[in-house]
Amino acid sequence: MASRQTDPFIGREILNGQFRILQKIGTGGMGSVYRAAQPAMKREVAIKILHPKLAGRKDLTSRFRREARAMSQLTHPNTARVFMYGELEEDGSLYIVMEMLEGKNLNQTVRRGGPLPVERAIPILVQVCGALQEAHELGIVHRDLKPENIFLCNQGGLVDFPKVLDFGLAKVTEQQMQPGSMILTQEGMVFGTPEFMSPEQAQGRTLDARSDIYSLAVILYEVLTGKLPFDAKTPMEYIQKHVTAPIIPLNERVEGMSFPEGLGKVLEKALQK
């Protein structure tokens, strides 16, 4: 059933007719994502457009540009590719053109099929480590790793090929910033997702690559067990436990589930405060 408020972007041609927007495939706090045709290249792409009502907010537009700039520098095969970004001439809306991915994110995969066996989970997350290593070497910290931001697709005959999405909170380090551009995180401002947040992020501290490693370990723990490393009922309680509580050991988390001996030790090390 079509919604009464038709999305003004659907059916539109943008960027001098290079792209035709076909349908909306997702909406988030910052904007919407559309499937679009790019006839000259005979392909479909995903286009993320910042909510027009936010285009006047300097902090958010800067953050959107930072996301685009960060992602356009990344070339690892396990990172979602960014083809171009900028602002639309018609109304100043900011956009990012990305590769179109078909598949399911890690959250949907575990929700529908239950926890993944070790033999399936580890190769997926090892590939994610490769994507993060490239970003970290360029001074880019993801800052919002969660199962929704790891997309599993079939690519070139490979199944379970993960793509890391949405370096939306990526903070390009000071040496990476162009002269004259602002450093954007207000110190003490907490961005991120409480269940997967590192202790230092929960406390609003300056982050480096270790914060992403912590978040990735929380993801692996959840993918293997279907549960998080702490019992908590509210986002605030998760934040407190990341800062203060020891994790529930992997082999004690779910009755009847046991894992290779070294795996619990690896997770404990990655989840150190």
Image: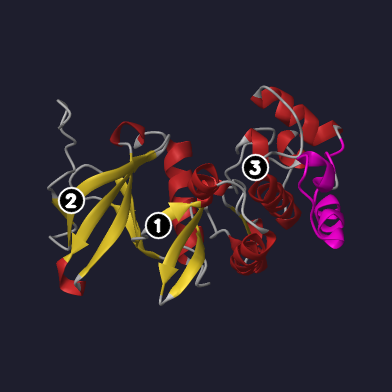
Write down the quadrant of residue 83 in the picture. bottom left
Please report the residue visible at 64 percent of the width from the left and 56 percent of the height from the top: 174
Residue 100 on the magenta segment: no
Q: Which mark is residue 226?
A: 3
Amino acid type of the residue that numbered disc 2 sits on in the rendered structure? Leu
Q: Which residues are magenta?
A: 246-271
- For residue 169, say whether it is visible: no
Nearer to the camera, 21 or 228 = 228
Residue for badge 1: 103
Tell me if 177 is positioned left or right of 224 in this view.
left
Label 2: how many Cα within 10 Å (few below 14, some 14–19, many 20+): some
Nearer to the camera, 178 or 14 = 14
Residue for badge 2: 22
- Tag 2 or tag 3, which sits nearer the N-term? 2
Q: CA–CA distance between discs 3 and 1?
A: 20 Å
Q: Position of residue 243 (x, y in %)?
A: 81, 34
Query: Do callouts 2 and 1 mark residues in contact (Cβ within 8 Å)?
Result: no
Quarter in which the N terminus is drawn: top left
Q: Position of residue 43 (x, y in %)?
A: 23, 68
Q: CA–CA distance between discs 2 and 1?
A: 18 Å
Amino acid type of the residue that numbered disc 3 sits on in the rendered structure? Gly
Tell me if 203 is positioned left or right of 23 in this view.
right
Secondary element under disc 3, as helix, strand or loop, is: loop
Tell me if 127 is positioned left or right of 21 in this view.
right
Quarter in which the C terminus is drawn: top right
Label 3: how many Cα within 10 Å (few below 14, some 14–19, many 20+): some
